[in-house]
Image (cartoon, grey):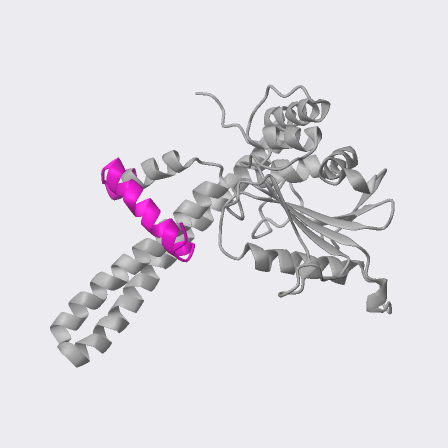
Amino acid sequence: MAQEYFDFTNDLIFRWVMEREENCLAILRAILPDLKITAVKRRENEHPVNYLAFDDERGVRFDAIIEDDQERFYDVEMQVANQPGLGKRVRYYQAQIDQETLKKGEDYDALRESYVIFFCAFDPCGQDRRLYQFHYYEDNDRQLRLSTNSHVILINALGTKGQITPALAAVLDVMNRRRDNANPLAVRLVKEIDGYNRDKKRRRALMNLKMRLKDEWRLGLSEGFDQGRAEGKAEGLNQGRAEGKAEGLSQGRAEGKAEGRDETMLSLIHTLQMQGQTKKQIVETLALMQKSSLAEAQRYYAQLTEAANGGEH
């Protein structure tokens, strides 16, 4: 059996690639060629994570703010799962940049120019554009832009519209596991990622991370069922007092079990998306777990993801 291949969208692979300043510089220049960036350095967290061991830390947070030669700051992130709240996450990272880069005693006028950049393995805005950029504009006059010196860039690995640099197109090909792009940056990244997959020590770290995510999913599964039972019982008791104890308990248990199951399965879908599984693979997993047909699993998948996205299509 062939070994599992961990690609550029894997949290650890992405961070190992971005730890190398030559990669940071090349990728930022691919995204923002007009800035003419010539050098970068990483500003590490006060308490850095040991990427090669996951025994003492809960969770996988790998922040490092990047500073260029003109004192502009960047936070570059990889987002695999299309989950609600991306805008709030962007806001949080922007606040982190400001907090960590404004020196003690400095006034807000000293805030540096900053960029929060997300590589997304999905279309975050649904317009098939390869790159979205956001700023503050007046609601009624789009010509009025508030000068905050902050920028948000969302890069869509699945997009087909809009002009981007050949180097950024090469990075997106690497995200999508296309190995035939001859661009020097793509060739270098693929070679580096292949090396991480072959390295025994790093591969052990990758497997440890995978097992940690699986353990957290199992914990979520258990908690989901427990919560479903508890809420079902409470709801059943309340309804039973109004409409009859027997009917209320029965309906409460049924609804609680269904709600707990739905929350658990949605958590499973998000976890599998983070691990890079395709929609087809996820549907097959749902069918296997529920002992249902692929058609039923497909309808259930659509129902859960539509509800999670607020009913949007």
- On the image, which quarter does residue 299 sit in? top left
Looking at this view, name the residue that lies furthest to the bottom: 242
* Residue occupying image coordinates x 66% and y 65%: 138
Of helix, strand and loop, which mostly describes the magenta segment? helix
- On the image, which quarter does residue 17 sit in? top right
The quarter of the rendered structure image containing the N terminus is top left
Can residue 134 be seen here? The reply is yes
Is residue 234 or residue 124 the one in the foreground? 124
Q: Which residues are magenta?
A: 288-313
The tally of labels here is: 0
| Relative height, residue 240 to residue 165 (above, below) | below
| Relative height, residue 226 to residue 63 (above, below) | below
Q: Is 202 situated left or right of 273 in this image?
A: right
* Residue occupying image coordinates x 71% and y 26%: 185
Q: Position of residue 243 (x, y in %)?
A: 14, 77
| Relative height, residue 80 to residue 198 (above, below) | below
Is residue 213 or residue 68 the one in the foreground? 68
Q: Is 89 situated left or right of 151 in this image?
A: left
Is residue 219 or residue 266 the one in the foreground? 266
Is residue 168 or residue 222 the one in the foreground? 168
Is residue 303 magenta-colored? yes
Q: Position of residue 90 (x, y in %)?
A: 62, 56
Can residue 289 be seen here? The reply is no
| Relative height, residue 83 to residue 237 (above, below) | above
Is residue 191 magenta-colored? no
Q: Is 21 situated left or right of 137 in this image?
A: right
* Residue occupying image coordinates x 76% and y 53%: 114
Q: Position of residue 165 (x, y in %)?
A: 70, 32
